[in-house]
Image (cartoon, grey):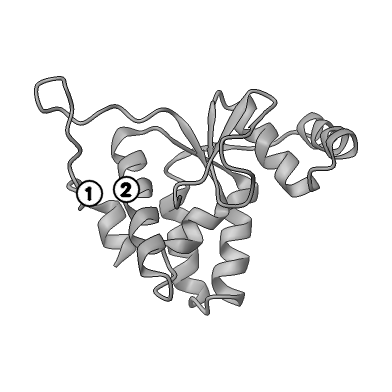
C-alpha cells in the first residue's frame, strides 16, 4: 500500500488551508528519522501510521524530505526484525525512501557525532542523526525519539505525533 502511495503522483494527503489563494503551504526541508518510516508500516498504531504516511508523502511531493544512509539501514533492520516485513518488500521500500535527499556521513561526521555524544550525553546514533540533519541544511528533525521542541546544534526536534 505505501509503495503505491509513495510512488503515486497524487498522494492521498489532506489539504490544509492556506492564506495564499488556496495553495498548500510549503513544507520546510526536514530530516526524517527512522521511527517515522517504521510507523508507515505499523498497522498496530493506526493514528501514528496515518500521520507518518501523510508527512512522508507530503515531503516526497514537495521534495523537502531528507534521510541518511543510517536511517535507511535502521529502517531495513527494524522493519524486517520487529515488524516482520518481508526482506524483499523492505528492500523495495528502502529504494523508495532513497528518492529523498540522502545524506552519506563521512568519517568526519562520525567523529563529530562521537564528540557530541561524549560532550552532551546524547546516544551516538541520535548524535549522528542530528549531525546528518545539520550537515544537510535541515532546521527540523522529525522524530519521536528526542525531546519535542528541543533545539540541538541548530536543529529543532519536532515530534509529529503530539
Q: CA distance from mark 2 to mark 1?
A: 7 Å
The residue shown at (31%, 33%) is 62
Give x and y (percent) for residue 44. Answer: 43, 76
> Which residue, as the protein is rendered here, is positioned at the far right?
118
Q: Is residue 114 left or right of residue 62?
A: right
Give x and y (percent) for residue 69. Answer: 61, 46
Q: Is residue 8 left or right of residue 30?
A: left
Q: Which mark is residue 13?
A: 1
Give x and y (percent) for residue 13. Answer: 22, 49
Q: For the residue labelled by badge 1, is the local secondary structure a helix, a strand or a loop? A: loop
Placement of the N terminus among the 4 image quadrants: bottom left
**Which residue does the numbered mark 2 point to in the structure image?**
57
Badge 2: how crowded within 10 Å, few (<14), some, or many (20+)?
many
Q: Is residue 2 left or right of residue 158?
A: left
Q: Are marks 2 and 1 in contact (CB under 8 Å)?
A: yes
Give x and y (percent) for residue 63. Answer: 36, 33
Amino acid at each position: 500500500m505505501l509503495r503505491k502511495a509513495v510512488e503515486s503522483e497524487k498522494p492521498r494527503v489532506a489539504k490544509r488551508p492556506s492564506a495564499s489563494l488556496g495553495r498548500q503551504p510549503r513544507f520546510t526541508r526536514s530530516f526524517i528519522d527512522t521511527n517515522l518510516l517504521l510507523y508507515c508500516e505499523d498497522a498496530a498504531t493506526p493514528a501514528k501510521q496515518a500521520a507518518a504516511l501523510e508527512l512522508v508523502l507530503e515531503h516526497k511531493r514537495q521534495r523537502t524530505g531528507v534521510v541518511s544512509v543510517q536511517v535507511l539501514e535502521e529502517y531495513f533492520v527494524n522493519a524486517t526484525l520487529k515488524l516482520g516485513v518481508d526482506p524483499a518488500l523492505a528492500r523495495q521500500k528502502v529504494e523508495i525512501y532513497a528518492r529523498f535527499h540522502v545524506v552519506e556521513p563521512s568519517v568526519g561526521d562520525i567523529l563529530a557525532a562521537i564528540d557530541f555524544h561524549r560532550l552532551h550525553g546524547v546516544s551516538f546514533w541520535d548524535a549522528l542523526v542530528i549531525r546528518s540533519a545539520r550537515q544537510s541544511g535541515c532546521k527540523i528533525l522529525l522524530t519521536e525519539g528526542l525531546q519535542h521542541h528541543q533545539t540541538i546544534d541548530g536543529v529543532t526536534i519536532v515530534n509529529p505525533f503530539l
